[in-house]
Image (cartoon, rainbow, N blue to C red):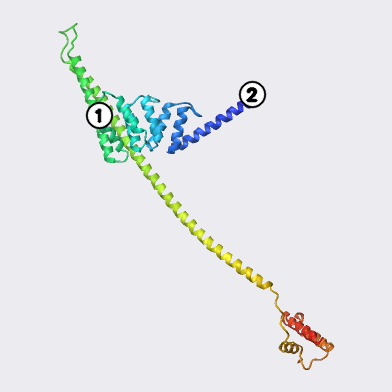
Amino acid sequence: MLKPFIIVSVLLSFSVYATDISILKSQAQANNVQAQYALALAYQQGDNTTKDLTQALVWFEKAAQQGDTNAMQQVVNAYEKGKGTDKNPQQVRYWLTLLALKGATHAPLQLGDYYASLKTERLPASAFAELWYKIASIHDPQAEEKYTHILQEKFNQQRARQVASINQLEQAVSQSPSSAEPETISPEPQPQANSGYVSNSNLLMALFIVFLMVLLWLTRIKRLKKQGLNQQAKQRQYEQDQQLLLQSKTIKQQKQQLKRLFNQLQQLQKSHKVLQQQAHVPSTPPEPTNQTMSVACALLGYTPDTLPDNKTIKVRYKQLCKIYHPDMKGSDDEMKRLNKAVKYVLAQRR
């Protein structure tokens, strides 16, 4: 019963790990330095993927090229101990020096130990020049040009040594005639064979030169492309910073406006409370005056001195209702005034 469950669990965990490493790869390929370093560690330790020191070095170098000091130290260790690559003292010197320039506290001591380990071996001045030109070429086009010139000189020297060795080999071949038939060998065929050999070697040398020039051109294009990407990234970062700054200013202004509205609302609430308190204060009814009595009598068609009895007043009221009632082409206001007048007069007669 448990066996199918265990198989399903293993498959699910494998799919989760595969998803994690694929996400990490996509982020690393998008030039995310943290993802590049994390992917390199995963390859180095075999975490959620197959252990591959060569791939680990590739991603450590990509992160190191973006200035990650931890990745730089990993690259130094790889070239120094030959992890995922051959040992390369020149790369060790380069990355250790770059680490020291980055301000890593352990790098100067490690660099000193490295030079002390050379003991009697002496490095030529050209090696140091090449090292510093390579470091400066990261940000300085003039240094990049000088670094390319040094590489070209090294290639020319190597080519000259190859040509010299080829010439020596040709001379050795031309000076060793066959002992079996010394008289029958004519001097003409040997130069023809040698010329064919030389032409073939020259063709290989020309192809090698073309290959090297293409490689240098591709390297320069890659470097220029990287500089362009860095400039675009800086421009995007600057635009994002400006946008965030503008948004923060807008939010600040909105907060200030909301604060003002809130203060105004509080003042209105206070004013409303005062008005409510004033509205709930009982007002003393005005004392009746002769003027009020005169107006009420006038509405009924009398004067205070000629008021009849209450029965006659009620008959007059019914007659006036036929005139002022809204159903009789009167109005509500007039009817209200008539009702108030009758009530007032009758109340005064009691």
Q: Is residue 189 visible?
A: no
Q: 307 and 61: which one is in front?
A: 307
The amino acid type found where label 1 is placed reads Lys
Circle on res. 9: none
Image quarter hosting the N terminus? top right
The amino acid type found where label 2 is placed reads Lys
Circle on res. 154: 1
Horizontally, residue 11 falls left or right of residue 179, namely: right
**Where does the image place residue 9, in percent across and percent down from the top left?**
60, 28
Q: 161 and 100: which one is in front?
A: 100
State the separation of the CA atoms marked 1 and 2: 65 Å
Q: Residue at x 23, y 24 (%)?
A: 202
Circle 2 packing at 10 Å, graded few (<14), some (14-19), many (20+), is: few
**Where does the image place residue 280, in percent across and percent down from the top left?**
69, 72
Instruction: Find numbered disc 2 in the image and state the secondary structure of the residue it sits on.
Output: helix
Q: Quadrant of residue 13?
A: top right
In this view, 28 is above or below 330: above
Q: Residue at x 84, y 87 (%)?
A: 311
- Report which residue position mark 2 lands on: 3
Q: Residue at x 25, y 36 (%)?
A: 146
Q: Quadrant of residue 309?
A: bottom right
Q: Is residue 263 visible?
A: yes
